[in-house]
Amino acid sequence: QAFWFEMKSAQVARWTCPGPRCWKRQSSACSSIRLVEDIVKFEIYHGGAIHPQHGDEARERYMTFSGMWGIFGEAKPSTAIIALRHPCLRGELSEVKSLYATKLQEGAPVAVVQDLLGVFARTKLMESPSTEAANYRVASWQREGDAEDLQSPVQSVPADNIFGGWPAMSLMLSHPMRSIANEVEFMWPFPVNSVVVKCRGEALGPDVGLGSLLRSPGELCISIDGVDYPLEHDAAASAAGRKAAKERQRKGLTRVIWSQAGGCGFLLLVW
């Protein structure tokens, strides 16, 4: 599925056809990767559904949650997605790779993105990048059997599938502010020294959960190295996420009801 792109005022990109797998555009790429402070911003919205404009940008479809979440089967933790809106990110994976290219360093966190295989993982680069290398060694994100506590083995991944960062992350609503700096650093295309999430100019407490930003979305910003960038609530995407969550809950409840009805019917036959 392809995205189709059209330009609006102030160089804001709008995707008119969502698609979770590939990003393509109908316009030329940004001529530079220079940050423009009055254009760069962040957005936050409820996860669980395909974004009406940007598609499955946080690759939630590929993310798995350990364990069974209750008796509902399809029930999953409620999530929020934080996304970077940058004038040089207009839809192509090549643009993402270019923007985060300087962050590809040995030992640095990287994103492994293999859309055709349904893989989206955050791991560590285990060797210095080279333009001549067709594959890079990364710490494996796959766990086998009961060896979860052992040191992660190394596996080889095509260089084209490795990115120095990623512009959208899916996080649990309970994710505290004290841990948000690591996520923003991974989303930001350059090295970061300090990250502070502010509401009405005041820094939020370290124990404040990410979900509170969705309940009080006014006058939010993320300060990176002393520069404030707006953090805006995407109401349309949030509405789609809440609707999808209710639909999953309804399906789970229906499954439980049918399961209980089948058990009662069996007991009646036995009786």
Image (spheres, rainbow, N blue to C red):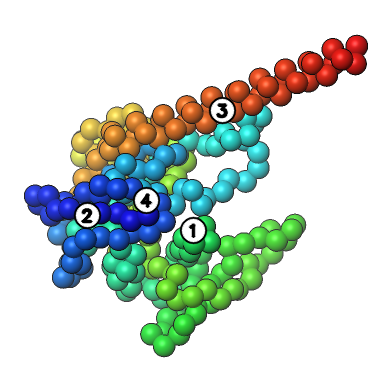
Tell me the crowding category of disc 4: few under 14, some 14 to 19, or many 20 or more residues within 10 angstroms, Cα based.
many
Q: Relative to 165, does residue 240 appear above or below in the rendering?
A: above
Q: CA gap, disc 4 to disc 2?
A: 12 Å
Element on which disc 2 rests: strand
Q: Mark 1 points at which residue?
A: 120
The amino acid type, in three-letter code, at marker 3 is Lys
Q: In which quarter of the image is the C terminus?
A: top right
Amino acid marked by disc 2: Phe
The amino acid type of the residue labelled 4 equals: Gly
Viewer-proximal residue, 119 or 20?
20
Q: Which residue is drawn at 18% across and 62% down?
A: 27
Residue drawn at x 72%, y 20% as measured from the top left: 260
Query: Which residue is disc 4 drawn over?
Result: 19
Front: mark 1 or 4: 4
Of callouts 2 and 3, which one flags the residue occurring earlier in the amino acid sequence? 2
Disc 2 target residue: 5
Q: Mark 1 belongs to which amino acid?
A: Phe
Nearest to viewer (mark 1 / mark 2): 2
Q: Which residue in the rendered view is the most extreme toward the bottom?
A: 132
Instruction: Identify the mark at residue 251; answer none if there is no mark.
Output: 3
Horizontal arrangement in the rendering, residue 79 relative to residue 234 (left or right)? right
Distance (Cα) linking label 1 and label 2: 24 Å
* Mark nearer the N terminus (1 vs 4): 4
Residue 148 place in picture, x, y as percent: 68, 58
